[in-house]
Image (cartoon, helix red, strand yellow):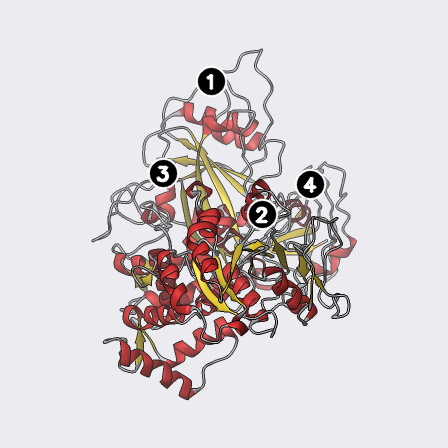
């Protein structure tokens, strides 16, 4: 909606045919009719008149009133209004055309007692305003019949043919500047013609809604129809009324609305419910025909539409700043809303959306937002999208492109249906009183976040690395490897698809470079996104290798594929010449945990190349040993490797090369193994001695310690206390793994413990 309104008054102003347009302005401002009429030559410009600044004693009628600005707080629509007068004696034709170009609405004033001024509307003023069709949309026109006190019968019979001939004429108002009749109404209708124009909504010749208006109202109807029965019940009508106008309809008002529809249109009410075409659209047509088009505009703007009947950019993409190093996730409000949309469109209640149900969900979008890659991106079932895969897709879209996710939420009507200012509340978790650090403008200091409204724009990755643990619920793993090593099969294995897998009724989707599913990490559900990346693309200076964990994949039967992965790890292209610029070392000197994966483990190994073997390379760089993987056969592949990747991403400074397997432990941490000959081979309790242990943190070298516990002759031995040098990570935890010597000298391994230092 426009922020201000500029009204231009035109009409005959010569000596023998004065229509009184200047008197209308002065009567509005002074609330009195200026009795002294002075016909003067052009005079110097005077300061703009403000409401109440003109008194009866000093009132005169000049040839042209100065531009007047009426403040927003005294106008019905709460919008500043500029009123501009025109004088043929003081202004040139060029000046007039400039004023017409700047005007939002033109009031053509005529004298109801002079038929010649009525004819001038058709022959002079309307062609002057809208005669140049190249100007674009026609300027709305209000016909103003002044001096109604001189002709009690009015002039509507003479004006109606003109209104029928020119559709840009919004309405006609008969008034009297002398009697102050309809003066305020005149300028109210002029404001309304700008703020609530009829032309975009209604075709007066066809006497029906324009296609764009009907399409927008149809979308609003579908969003309001919560039970998908193609009709609005009393409860749905009241929810719609409250969303748009702030209060529900009285029971009698509801019955009156349905009675009006039933009397005028067959099929407008079905089973005591308001239908779409014959009911909802008819009501809005009736509002417009009766001059209440502001009602339809209120509905449209509440659901995000602008003057062009398209969803506005502010509605679809509200301000949301995601700082570098942070990511966006849906919060509980967002997940509840999209799940509600899922349940609404799951008409057969089978827990999955069919193709027809997906099309119903996307019917409020300009185009289907999810393409044919969907079956290759999330888990599907027999060609249907279950709730789990549906939520995964929303999570993926939000993580990769938060603006696109905001648009999708806007098309589904999140701000209106959830009674929120914008759909950013589904991303940030903020509230109007405590918006959190990511909703405040960059030039203002962020307000402290309320404990119950914590932001879901994640904290910077650097802070996660310093603390040795991430709070993110969505983790990104880049699967890097040469062409043909099995990256795509690895992604499909994550979705439970083997090489021979094909669900009955499952359409063959287009390949996708992304796959997303949930994994359990220490009892918590995390979304893991796998992104397929060609190794060659990372051997460029502008490559983006950022992620939460890197999976470097090579073909066990092709040793050359490992050499390429090793080059990516060290960010050195083996094909470059001595003149090529040095590349940034993405992973070797970085802080991203890496795991080498040997694909096609079911095939025999190839002839090794000179140099380090994969196992020796990983051992030298203090990396986990290469993990074998195969997805051959129709059996669902083992998913433990994906849990391992998610664990490494959640605890980025836990060395996966530990002797106790995949237990989490920060990279700069102390390793302690202890054992003893206790009763029945059980391990001794060494926890009381931990406080006396000096691990030599910050030395960057191995340290060893030995002590004993005086409890029944039980001895504790420290086999190794190891620190891995990592200057950017903090040693904050100690991994304690225990083992005891049984009666037969056997060794048991107990569950490791992660203790803070």
- Residue, disc 1: 610
Specify the quadrant of the image occupied by residue 696: top right
Q: CA distance from mark 3 to mark 4?
A: 37 Å
Compared to residue 540, the image places residue 655 above or below, namely below
Local crowd at mark 1 within 10 Å, few (<14), some, or many (≥20)? few
Residue drawn at point x = 38 percent, y = 43 percent: 491
Which is nearer the N-term, disc 3 or disc 4? 3
Q: Position of residue 531 (x, y in %)?
A: 45, 41
Mark 4 or 1, nearer chain start: 1
Instruction: Say whether residue 305 is visible.
Output: no
Rate crowding at label 3 as few (under 14), some (14 to 19) or many (20 or more) other CA atoms within 10 Å: many
Q: What is the residue that sits farthest to the front in this orientation?
A: 16
Sequence order check, earlier mark of 3 and 2: 2
Q: Residue furthest left?
A: 504
Q: Provide the secondary structure element on which disc 3 rests.
A: helix
Residue where numbered disc 4 is placed: 723
Disc 3 designates what residue?
488
The residue at which mark 2 appears reads as: 99
């Amino acid at each position: 909606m426009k922020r201000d309104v500029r009204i231009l008054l035109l009409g005959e102003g010569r000596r023998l045919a004065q229509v009184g347009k200047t008197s209308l302005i002065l009567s509005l401002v002074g609330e009195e009719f200026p009795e002294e009429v002075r016909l003067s030559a052009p005079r110097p410009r005077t300061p703009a008149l403000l409401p109440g600044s003109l008194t009866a004693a000093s009132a005169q009628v000049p040839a042209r009133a100065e531009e007047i600005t009426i403040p927003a707080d005294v106008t019905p629509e709460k919008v500043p209004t500029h009123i501009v007068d025109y004088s043929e004696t003081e202004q040139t034709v060029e000046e007039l055309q400039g004023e017409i170009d700047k005007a939002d609405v033109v009031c053509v004033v005529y004298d109801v007692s002079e038929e010649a001024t009525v004819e001038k509307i058709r022959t002079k003023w309307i062609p002057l305003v809208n005669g140049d069709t190249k100007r674009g949309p026609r300027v709305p026109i209000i016909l103003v019949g002044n001096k109604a006190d001189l002709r009690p019968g009015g002039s509507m019979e003479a004006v109606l043919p003109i209104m029928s001939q020119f559709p840009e004429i919004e309405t006609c108002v008969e008034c009297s500047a002398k009697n102050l009749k309809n003066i305020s109404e005149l300028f109210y209708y002029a404001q309304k013609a700008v703020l609530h124009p009829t032309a975009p909504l209604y075709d007066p010749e066809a006497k029906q809604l324009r296609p764009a208006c009907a399409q927008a109202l149809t979308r609003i109807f579908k969003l309001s129809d919560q039970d998908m029965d193609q009709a609005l019940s009393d409860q749905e009508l009241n929810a719609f009324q409250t969303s748009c106008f702030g209060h529900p309809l009285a029971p009698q008002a509801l019955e009156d609305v349905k009675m009006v529809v039933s009397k005028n249109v067959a099929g407008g009410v079905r089973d005591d419910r308001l239908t779409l075409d014959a009911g909802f659209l008819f009501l809005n047509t009736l509002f417009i025909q009766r001059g209440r088009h502001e009602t339809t505009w209120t509905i449209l703007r509440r659901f995000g539409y602008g003057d062009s009947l398209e969803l506005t950019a502010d509605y679809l993409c509200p301000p949301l700043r995601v700082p570098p190093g942070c990511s966006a996730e849906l919060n509980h409000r967002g997940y509840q809303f999209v799940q509600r949309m899922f349940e609404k469109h799951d008409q057969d209640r089978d827990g999955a959306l069919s193709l027809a149900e997906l099309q119903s969900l996307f019917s409020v979008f300009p185009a289907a937002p999810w393409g044919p890659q969907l079956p290759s991106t999330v888990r599907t079932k027999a060609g249907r999208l279950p709730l789990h895969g549906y939520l995964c897709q929303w999570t993926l879209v939000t993580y990769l492109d938060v603006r696109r996710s905001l648009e999708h939420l806007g098309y589904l009507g999140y701000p209106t249906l959830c009674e929120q200012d914008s759909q950013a509340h589904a991303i940030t978790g903020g509230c109007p009183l405590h918006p959190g650090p990511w909703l405040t403008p960059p030039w203002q200091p962020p307000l402290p976040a309320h404990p119950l409204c914590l932001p879901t724009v994640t904290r910077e990755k650097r802070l996660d690395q310093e603390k040795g643990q991430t709070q993110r619920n969505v983790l990104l793993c880049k699967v890097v490897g040469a062409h043909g090593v099995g990256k795509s099969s690895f992604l499909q294995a994550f979705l439970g698809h083997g090489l021979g897998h094909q669900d009955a009724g499952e359409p063959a989707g287009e390949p996708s470079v992304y796959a997303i599913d949930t994994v359990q990490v220490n009892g918590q559900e995390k979304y893991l996104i796998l992104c397929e990346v060609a190794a060659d693309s990372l051997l460029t200076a502008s490559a983006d290798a950022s992620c939460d964990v890197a999976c470097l994949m090579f073909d066990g039967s092709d040793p050359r594929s490992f050499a390429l992965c090793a080059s990516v790890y060290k960010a050195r292209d083996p094909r470059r010449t001595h003149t090529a610029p040095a590349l940034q070392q993405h992973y070797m000197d970085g802080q991203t945990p890496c795991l080498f994966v040997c694909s096609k483990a079911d095939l025999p190994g190839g002839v090794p190349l000179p140099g380090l073997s994969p196992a020796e390379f990983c051992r030298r760089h203090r990396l986990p040993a290469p993990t074998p993987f195969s997805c051959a056969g129709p059996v669902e592949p083992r998913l433990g490797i994906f849990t391992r990747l998610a664990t490494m991403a959640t605890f980025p400074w836990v060395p996966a090369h530990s002797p106790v397997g995949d237990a989490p432990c920060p990279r700069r941490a102390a390793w302690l193994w202890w054992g003893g000959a206790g009763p029945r081979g059980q391990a001794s309790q060494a926890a009381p001695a931990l406080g006396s242990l000096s691990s030599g943190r910050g030395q960057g070298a191995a340290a060893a310690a030995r002590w004993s516990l005086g409890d029944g002759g039980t001895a504790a031995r420290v086999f190794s206390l190891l620190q891995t040098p990592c200057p950017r990570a903090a040693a904050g935890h100690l991994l304690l793994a225990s083992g005891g010597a049984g009666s037969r000298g056997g060794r048991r391994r107990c569950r490791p413990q992660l203790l803070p230092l």
